[in-house]
Image: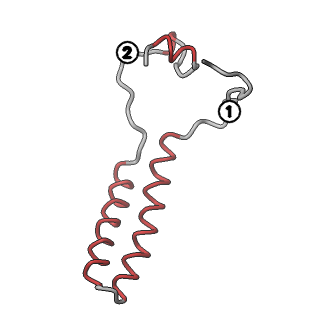
Amino acid sequence: MSLTDLRKLDLLRPEEEWSGRTPRSTVYVSLAGVAAALGLGSCVLMALGDGGVLTWIGAAVFGVALVAFTIVNVRAIAVPSDTEPADESESVD
């Protein structure tokens, strides 16, 4: 996708706001890492549980870790609430 295409879709910041630096991620790496480690640990519990209690504990922990990982990463890309959404009636071809 070219710069012209991105401008047409209104996906770029105004050029006067361009800094020339590479954008940094706003993801909390430590929280994402903890959630990922819990997810991996829960997979081990499910495998070791062999259908027993540990399997269900691992499944529950995996669900919590998945939700936590998703929330942490989605917050990093959330659109600020003070911006207005684009008018959906306009189509760009």
The residue under the point 37% across, 54% down is 32
Hey, which quadrant is residue 41 in on the image?
A: bottom left
Tell me: 77 left or right of 92: left
Q: Count the marks.
A: 2
Percent position (x, y) of residue 81? Answer: 66, 37
The N terminus lies in quadrant: top left
Disc marking residue 5: none
- Separation of residues labelled 2 and 1 (CA atoms): 25 Å
Q: Dot 2: few (<14), some (14–19), or many (≥20) neighbours within 10 Å?
A: few
Hey, which quadrant is residue 90 in on the image?
A: top right
Disc marking residue 82: 1
Residue placed most toward the observer, 9 or 85: 9
Question: Which amino acid is tagged 1?
Answer: Asp
Secondary element at tag 1: loop
Secondary element at tag 2: loop
Disc 2 target residue: 20
Q: Image height check: is 57 above or below 65?
A: below
The residue under the point 34% across, 85% down is 54
Furthest-right residue in view? 89
Percent position (x, y) of residue 5? Answer: 50, 15
Tell me: 89 left or right of 15: right
The residue under the point 50% across, 54% down is 71
Q: Which of marks 2 and 1 is nearer the N terminus?
A: 2
Q: Dot 1: few (<14), some (14–19), or many (≥20) neighbours within 10 Å?
A: few
Q: Image height check: is 77 above or below 85?
A: below
The C terminus lies in quadrant: top right
Q: Are marks 2 and 1 in contact (CB under 8 Å)?
A: no
Question: Which amino acid is tagged 2?
Answer: Gly
Q: Image height check: is 90 above or below 14?
A: below
Tell me: 53 left or right of 9: left
Percent position (x, y) of residue 76? Answer: 47, 42
